[in-house]
Image (cartoon, rainbow, N blue to C red):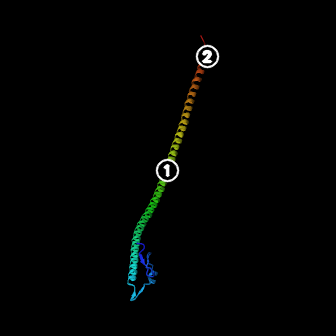
Amino acid sequence: MGYSQRVSGNSPLNEVTEVPLTPAEIVHWQFRRRLLGYSVKDVKAFVQQVSETVAQLMEENQSLKEERERLLERLQVYQAIEQQLQNALIVAEKIADDIKRQAQREAELIIAQAQHEAEQIKADARNQYQAELEKIERLRQLQTRLVTELRHLLLSHLELLEKTSAGFIGEEVKLDEEPMD
C-alpha cells in the first residue's frame, strides 16, 4: 500500500518515482507520440499505474470501511453500555427514592408510636396520680373518722371519768361526814 511506482510519461527521462497518482495527473497525462499514435509501452505503464492506484485506493477504502464497521460495532457496544448505565442510574435513583420514602414512612410510624406511647404514659401517670389522690382522700377521710371516733371515745371516757370523779368526791364527802368512832 502507500505509493506505487510511476513511469512519468511527461518526463523525457522516463523516471520511476514513488508517489500516488492524482486525479489531475490522470486527466493531464500526456503520452509520447509514436508514428502510429501513442506509445504502447507508455500507455501500458500508465494503465498499470492507474490500476495499481485504483487497487490501492480500493484496498484503503475497504480497510477504512472495515475499520468504520469495527468502530461502529464498538460504538454500538459503548452505546449499549451507556444505555445500561443510564438504566442502572435510573434504577438506582428509583431505589434511593424508594428507600427515602420507606425511611420517611418508618420515621413517621416511629414518631406516631412514640407519640402514642407518650400519650399512654401520660394517661397512666394521670390515672396513677388520680389513684394516689383518691388514696390520699380516703386516708384523710379515715383520719377524720378516726379523729372523730377517738374524740368521741375520749369524750365518753372523760365523761365517765368526770362521773366517776364526781362520785368519788361525793363519797369522800360522805366519808368525811361519818363520825369516827
What number is the disc on residue 114? 1
Number of marks in the rendered image: 2
Quote the CA–CA distance across marks 1 and 2.
89 Å
On the image, the x and y values in percent for residue 168 come to: 58, 21
Is 162 situated left or right of 118 in this image?
right
Q: Is residue 140 above or below residue 57?
A: above
Find out whether the residues at labels 1 and 2 contact each other: C-beta distance under 8 Å: no
Residue 155 on image: x %, y %: 57, 30
Instruction: Classify 122 as above or below 101.
Output: above
Residue that protrudes farthest toward the bottom in the picture: 36
Between residue 91 and residue 156, name the one nearer to us: 91
Q: Is residue 155 left or right of residue 94?
A: right
Q: Quadrant of residue 145?
A: top right
Query: Is 152 or 43 nearer to us in this picture?
Result: 43
Badge 1 density bin: few <14, some 14–19, many ≥20, Cα 10 Å: few
Q: Earlier in the sequence, mark 1 or mark 2?
A: 1
Q: Secondary structure at mark 1?
A: helix
* SS label for mark 2: helix
Q: Quadrant of the N terminus?
A: bottom left
User: Circle 2 sits on which residue?
Assistant: 176
Label drawn at residue 179: none
| Kind of residue at badge 1 | Ala
Quarter of the picture containing the C terminus is top right
Residue pushed farthest top? 181
Q: Position of residue 94 (x, y in %)?
A: 45, 61
Depth-wise, is mark 1 or mark 2 nearer the camera? 1
Q: Amino acid at mark 2?
A: Asp
Residue 117: x and y, percent? 49, 49
| Image height of 166 relative to 178, above or below | below
- Compared with 26, 135 (above or below) is above
